[in-house]
Image (cartoon, rainbow, N blue to C red):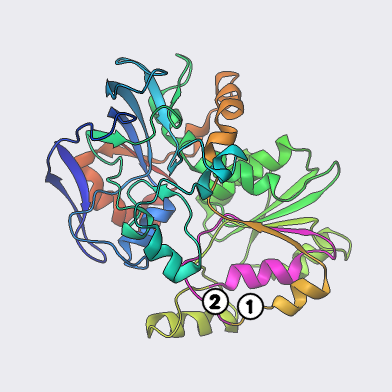
Amino acid sequence: MKAVCWCGAGRVQVENVADPRITNSRDAIIRVKATAICGSDLHLFGGYIPSMEPGDILGHEFAGEVVEVGRKVENLKPGDRVVVPFTIACGSCFFCKRQLWSLCDNSNPNAKDLEALYGQSGSGLFGYSHLYGGYAGGQAEYVRVPFADVGPMKLPDAVSDEQAALLADVLPTGYMAAENCNIGPGDVVAVWGCGPVGLFAIKSAFWLGAERVVAIDRFEERLELARDFGGETLNYEEQDVFETLTELTHGRGPDGCIDAVGMEAHGTTLDAWYDRVKHSTYLATDRLHALRQAIHACRKGGSLSIPGVYGGFLDKVPFGAAFAKGLKIAMGQTHVHRYLKQLIDRVEQGFDPSHIISHRGRLEDAPGLYETFRDKAEACTKVVLQP
């Protein structure tokens, strides 16, 4: 089969690789009908996530059709259309039983490596380095899905394949980001980053009762999508973020702040340039300008939600400000399984997540589209591939 393979920092290519096969009685083989390039894939593309190996198959946002199931998979049959959560979960451990699916104890065969780095391991992830299990991803014609009796969810006819691919990660991630803000009626929420996760966090914040959402970015095509979802927009290259948010909230600050940027943040202030210098000279693992800004801007007693991925040890975090203001902080990989049913219902009832897609292509187009998405060229906001 054909698959998109990582070949080193800044290089991917489409290769012919062996077809996946059933290796466990709880496996399923899925024929991929739609797969997306995620902002997290760009971290891999840039070489920022350790333990990638040449030939690793990328992709964790995908949907498709079941072609084969293991003997213990009774909930699926060949021909079923499914979306597959990017987090792999066993369904029976301490964390899965508490719906903390991305913290599964049993799905990462390389848990000891992650424990050495972070203290404990989360779940395995599709196409996201050997630290997270070394699982082949879904930017391929076929993919093996472990624990298929737990993860994949059947799709109604009204949900298209490309809509379903966005249900595998970015839509649930945006929803959990908003939920982590403890939003109440009349709240003002600020969202840093109007990529796919930020855009869905904006929409989700309104679903959860926010009165106003302020979207922060510098690319007009992304700010326009934020306005489509009801957000007020702030271009950080043209306005001072802290002063503007303070003014918009009558001196109080946003009730909830969402950092949907993560480890590759950009900015125009001195700390952003400091991050870029340290990052480029390998003296820092992450650029965290957006996180600092969100902590600084959030109101006293407010909530800080961090769906943006961070990978290492963070420098110059204003933790004293977070403590002094009594901020409630929530973060982590998304518990996709928890949200899929309600979000599929919203799509079936008329919400179209594919509105954010700007570029479509075949697997063969992946190398060029990775560069386009990374460079934010051609007003690229989201890429979906069809094998």
Is residue 341 shown in magenta? no
Q: Alpha carbon of mark 1 to alpha carbon of mark 2: how far?
A: 7 Å
Location of residue 50 (image quadrant): bottom left
Viewed as shown, does residue 196 lie left or right of 112?
right
Q: Which residues are magenta?
A: 288-315
Q: Identify the residue at image location x=47%, y=21%.
A: 159
Q: Identify the residue at image location x=49%, y=68%.
A: 118
> Where residue 128 sits: x, y (%)?
35, 53
Assign a secondary structure to mark 2: loop
- Which amino acid lies under the numbered mark 1 shown in the image of this protein? Val
- Residue at label 2? 314
Mark 2 neighbour class, 10 Å CA radius: few under 14, some 14 to 19, many 20 or more: few
> Where residue 355 sits: x, y (%)?
50, 34
Viewed as shown, does residue 211 lie left or right of 170?
right
Image quarter hosting the N terminus: top left
Check contact, mark 1 vs mark 2: CB within 8 A: yes
Mark 1 neighbour class, 10 Å CA radius: few under 14, some 14 to 19, many 20 or more: some
Checking the image for residue 317, the label placed there is 1
Is residue 297 shown in magenta? yes
